[in-house]
Image (spheres, grey):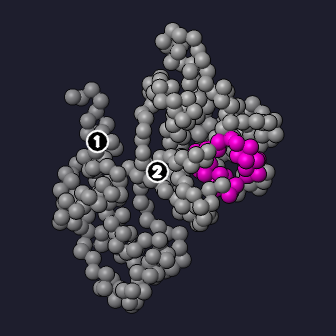
Amino acid sequence: MIHVTILGLYNSMATTVFGPMDILNQAGRLWNRLAGTPRTPLFDVTLASADGKPIRSVNRVEIMPHCSIEQISHTDLIIIASATYIDKILEQNPELPGWIRHHYDQGAHVASICTGAFLLAETGLLDGRSATLHWGFADRFKARYPNVRLQQDRIFIDHGRLYCSAGVTAGMDLSLYLVEKFCGRPAATKSAKTMVLAMDRESQAPFRCFPGITDHTDPLIARAQQWLETNLAREVNYDELARTLRISRRSLERRFKQATGMTPLSYLQALRVEKARQLLEEGIATFSEITYAVGYEDISFFRKLFIRLTGLRPKEYQKKFAGYAVHPPGSQ
C-alpha cells in the first residue's frame, strides 16, 4: 500500500482535494469490482489539515479531514490542494513549508495541484526547477518566485519526486500519472476507464485566454496597449506608434518589455489570437474570414501563429470549444 496524504488548505477548490482522493482510492478497487475480481487497493489515502480542524473550501463547504499534519508520522506522497490565498495560509500556518520539506527529506514524493504550487514553491524545493500551475496565476507566480522557471502551458511536470499540475482538473491528469508511476500503465489505464477520464493530455494552452497585461505602473505603455487593442485589425507601424507617443521606437520596445514582459509585436499577436479564439467559439465565421478580421492577409502564417499560441489547429479549437453549439451531440 502506498500511503498518500492530501493536504487541504484554506479556500482550496474542493475538486483539488476530492479529485485526487477519488482517483487514488478507487485504483485497484472500482475496476476489480466491475470485473468481478477481488479488490486490491493500491493507495491508502489520508486527508489532513494543518490543525485537524475542518477545511473551508472556496465554495464555503467545510471538509472534515481525517487528522492534522502532526499526526502524519510517515507518508510516501503528499498532494497539496490549491492554495490561492497563500499569504493567509502562511499567516495561519507558518509551519507548513517546513512540514512538507521534512517529509520530502525523509523520502516522500510531493505534488501540487493548481495554485498549490505557491505553497510548494515556499519550501524552496522548486528553486532552479520548472513548475506549472493554472494559467490565470502565472504572472503572480513569476513575480513571487523568480527562481522558479514557469512553464505555464504544461499540464503537469515530473521532477522525479516533485510534481506540479495546472488548474483544478489537471490534478486528475496528474493523479492518473501517479497511478501509472507507482503502479504501472495497466493500473492507470483501468483507472482512466473506470473514472471515464482522458489520458496523456499535454498542454493547457488551449484553455488559456489573454485579457491583456495591466499590472504595471507605466502610463505611456498603458496608452500603447490601448492603441494596439483599439487598432487590432490595422497594419501597425511601430515607428509611427512611437512618434505618436513622443518616444523613440527603441525606448518604446524597451519600456514595453519592461512593463509587460512582452514585445509590442508579441503582445499584438496575442491580442489577435485571442480575438480569433472568440470568433471561432461563436462558430459563425470561417478561419479565412477571421484572419482578415484580425489584421492578417497571410492565412498560412496566422494559422501557424494560432497553433503556436493555442496548441491546436483552428478547426480543432472550434470543435473543442464551440462543439456543442456547432455540432450538438447526437446531431449527426
* Highlighted magenta segment, given as a residue range: 97-124
Residue for badge 1? 319
Vertical comparison of 186 with 57: above or below? above
Question: Residue 293: x and y, percent?
Answer: 22, 62
Q: Nearer the viewer, mark 1 or mark 2?
A: 2
Q: Which mark is residue 154?
A: 2
What is the crowding at mark 2: few (fewer than 14 residues within 10 Å), some, or many (at least 20)? many
The front one of 256 and 202 is 202
Identify the image quadrant of the N terminus. top right
Question: Residue 98: x and y, percent?
Answer: 76, 51
Vertical comparison of 295 with 137: above or below? below
Q: Secondary structure at mark 2?
A: loop
- Amino acid bearing label 1: Lys
- Amino acid bearing label 2: Arg
Question: Residue 245: x and y, percent?
Answer: 39, 86
Query: Position of 85 compared to 293: left or right?
Result: right
The front one of 181 and 163 is 181
Which of pointers 1 and 2 lies earlier in the amino acid sequence?
Answer: 2
Q: Which mark is residue 289?
A: none
The front one of 244 and 6 is 6
Question: Residue 97: x and y, percent?
Answer: 73, 52
Query: Any magenta on residue 101?
Result: yes
Give the residue at x 24% y 74%: 235
What is the crowding at mark 1: few (fewer than 14 residues within 10 Å), some, or many (at least 20)? some
Query: Any magenta on residue 215?
Result: no
Query: Position of 147 compared to 196: left or right?
Result: right
| Res. 233 visible in picture | yes
Query: Position of 128 compared to 196: left or right?
Result: right
